[in-house]
Image: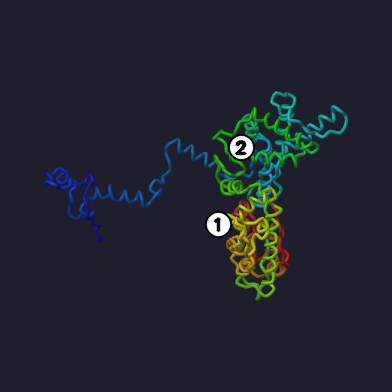
């Protein structure tokens, strides 16, 4: 038997009364040293109540209290969470926010992302319905063609006729949304159908109308409100400029007239705007385009898919380059290295990326002054004394081996290399890693991740589609019928691949700089070596 002994002063409640009350010799502490003792000296009852239960509490963690709750409050909370955790086959995401807050941007991003994820998804823009309805009214009144464009006065809460039209327009959009959600003929690959209602939905009454419309039915639709809140004036100014550039409401107006009308429209909405604050409903608030995100009653797939996406999106522009690994030596196994042609491709890729990095600094960031780029360069070269500065000409050499720094007294100094602001992501395949180990650029931030590895074809690994069709024609017919969900024997389906790629896509979305992806193979697509350039 192992005996746990203790050699120190005892200050415990169950020390004997003899120790607690016996007279103390002069000059001694009231906490009396006691002889060594072991837990087996204690009674069985005390050991169980003081030793085992205390140890169980700390060692077993939450399992110690993992019992079904009996109090009503806990049961109600669990019932609410259970209801929200279920993945609704038909979901409505209703956007909320004042004009110029990026609602349509969020709606389009959600649609594209959910479709890539395997869901049926469609945006229903109430502004589009409003322009069509107003145009029809104008044609009836005038008998001629009409634009359907509305001035700020149309959104005045005191304008009874306009208010009636706005309500009818919202109902038209919701009716079309209902028809689309009820049409379940299209495949959704387990994600269901997600309708995105793009409108201001700025009052509690309007949001209650949406809830009643979606819930008062046998197969009720799930509803989540996504509110875009923006109080950053600089960001608002940029949003207003972009809205004027792309909105049909301002296509025939000068910028000055349009900005006045837009600000007046916002003011009309602000007079009646009510933020989402009903904690009984499910909602997500996005502040200043993802600088902060607040979620309420959001569980299940929404919590692990939509919220990370909303947190990663931003309005910045940057290029993304996707390249296949260079040509290898051998039989194209997973451990193959680059051959002569592969290394030549790497050299050309490095030159291309370097030139594009400079182009990005010059063209894609025109809103930044040369001084800000110089400041960026100086911050990268922070190891040098503060009396050094970077010349404007040296900004163009960003990403090269060295740059010339000029002291304030006019003397020159050759500095080390800048760190190129490129996020490089590569699969763990040897040939993919070698492809992006660019020799002409230094200190690249390279992330190796198995998420970018090729589709695992299991038993059919190394075989082309033609060979698979000859070997297993029955399975091949299943692949032709549903290429997204059909899983390769012992391997993955394309749906599995998308789930694996999701975290990497989120990582790419949140980057504000340039991104280079190196993939070992692009599944069954063209085997020709190439680079894909995407600008976000």
Q: How many marks?
A: 2
In this rendering, position of residue 66 left or right of residue 356 = left
Looking at this rendering, what residue extends furthest in the right direction?
143
> Quick check: 495 above or below 324?
above
- The x and y percentages for residue 266 are 68, 32
- The x and y percentages for residue 439 are 63, 68
Which of the pair 471/245 is nearer the observer? Answer: 245
- The x and y percentages for residue 28 are 15, 48
Which of the pair 248/485 is nearer the observer? Answer: 248
Residue drawn at x 23%, y 57% is 5
Residue drawn at x 84%, y 27% is 141
In this rendering, position of residue 243 left or right of residue 40 = right
Q: Could you give the CA–CA distance between mark 1 and mark 2, rounded to whole angstroms? A: 34 Å
Q: Crowding near pointer 1: few (<14 within 10 Å), some, many (20+)? A: few
Residue drawn at x 64%, y 36% is 97
Q: Is residue 23 visible?
A: yes
Q: Secondary structure at mark 2?
A: loop
Which of the pair 442/39 is nearer the observer? Answer: 442
Q: Secondary structure at mark 1?
A: loop
Q: Crowding near pointer 2: few (<14 within 10 Å), some, many (20+)? A: few
- The x and y percentages for residue 379 are 58, 54
In this rendering, position of residue 16 left or right of residue 441 = left
Q: Which residue is mark 2?
A: 231
> Quick check: 176 above or below 268?
below
Q: Which residue is mark 1?
A: 382
Quadrant of res 248 = top right
Mark 1 touches mark 2? (CB < 8 Å): no
Q: Is residue 496 visible?
A: no
Going from N to C along the chain, the mark reached first, 1 or 2, is: 2
């Amino acid at each position: 038997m192992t005996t746990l002994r203790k050699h120190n002063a005892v200050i415990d409640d169950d020390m004997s009364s003899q120790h607690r009350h016996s007279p103390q010799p002069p000059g001694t502490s009231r906490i009396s040293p006691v002889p060594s003792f072991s837990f087996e000296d204690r009674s069985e009852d005390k050991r169980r109540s003081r030793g085992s239960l205390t140890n169980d509490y700390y060692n077993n963690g939450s399992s110690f209290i993992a019992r079904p709750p009996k109090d009503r409050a806990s049961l109600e909370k669990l019932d609410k969470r259970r209801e929200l955790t279920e993945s609704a086959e038909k979901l409505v995401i209703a956007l909320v926010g004042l004009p110029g807050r990026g609602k349509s941007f969020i709606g389009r991003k959600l649609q594209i992302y959910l479709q890539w994820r395997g869901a049926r998804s469609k945006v229903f823009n109430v502004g589009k319905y409003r322009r069509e309805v107003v145009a029809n009214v104008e044609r009836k009144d005038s008998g001629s063609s009409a634009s359907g464009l509305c001035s700020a006065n149309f959104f005045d809460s005191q304008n009874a006729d306009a208010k009636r039209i706005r309500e009818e327009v919202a109902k038209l959009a919701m009716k079309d949304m209902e028809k689309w959600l009820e049409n379940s003929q299209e495949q959704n690959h387990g994600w269901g159908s997600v309708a995105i209602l793009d409108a201001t939905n700025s009052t509690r009454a309007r949001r209650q109308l949406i809830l009643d419309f979606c819930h008062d039915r046998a197969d009720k639709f799930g509803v989540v409100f996504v509110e875009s809140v923006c109080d950053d004036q600089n960001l608002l100014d940029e949003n207003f400029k972009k809205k004027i550039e792309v909105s049909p409401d301002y296509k025939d107006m000068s910028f000055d007239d349009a900005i006045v009308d837009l600000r007046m429209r916002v003011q009309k909405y602000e007079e009646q705007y009510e933020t989402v604050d009903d904690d009984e409903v499910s909602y997500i608030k996005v502040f200043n385009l993802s600088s902060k995100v607040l979620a309420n009653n959001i569980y299940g797939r929404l919590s692990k898919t939509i919220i990370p996406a909303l947190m990663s999106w931003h309005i910045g522009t940057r290029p993304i380059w996707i390249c296949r690994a260079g040509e290898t030596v051998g039989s194209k196994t997973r451990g193959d290295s680059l051959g002569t042609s592969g290394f030549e491709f790497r050299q050309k890729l490095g030159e291309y990326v370097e030139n594009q990095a400079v182009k990005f600094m010059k063209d894609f960031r025109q809103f930044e002054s040369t001084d800000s780029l110089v400041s960026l360069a100086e911050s990268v070269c922070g190891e040098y004394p503060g009396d050094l500065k970077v010349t404007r000409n040296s900004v163009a050499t960003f990403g090269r081996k060295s740059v010339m720094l000029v002291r304030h007294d006019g003397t020159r100094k050759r500095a080390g290399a800048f760190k190129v602001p490129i996020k490089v992501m590569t699969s763990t395949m040897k040939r993919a890693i070698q492809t992006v180990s660019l020799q002409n650029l230094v200190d690249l931030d390279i992330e190796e991740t198995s998420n970018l590895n090729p589709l695992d074809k299991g038993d059919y690994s190394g075989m082309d589609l033609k060979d698979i069709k000859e070997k297993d024609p029955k399975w091949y017919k299943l692949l032709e019928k549903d290429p997204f969900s059909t899983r390769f024997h012992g391997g993955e389906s394309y749906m599995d691949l998308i789930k694996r790629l999701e975290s990497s896509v989120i990582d790419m979305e949140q980057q504000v700089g340039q991104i280079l992806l190196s993939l070992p193979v692009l599944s069954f697509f063209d085997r020709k070596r190439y680079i894909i350039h995407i600008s976000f």
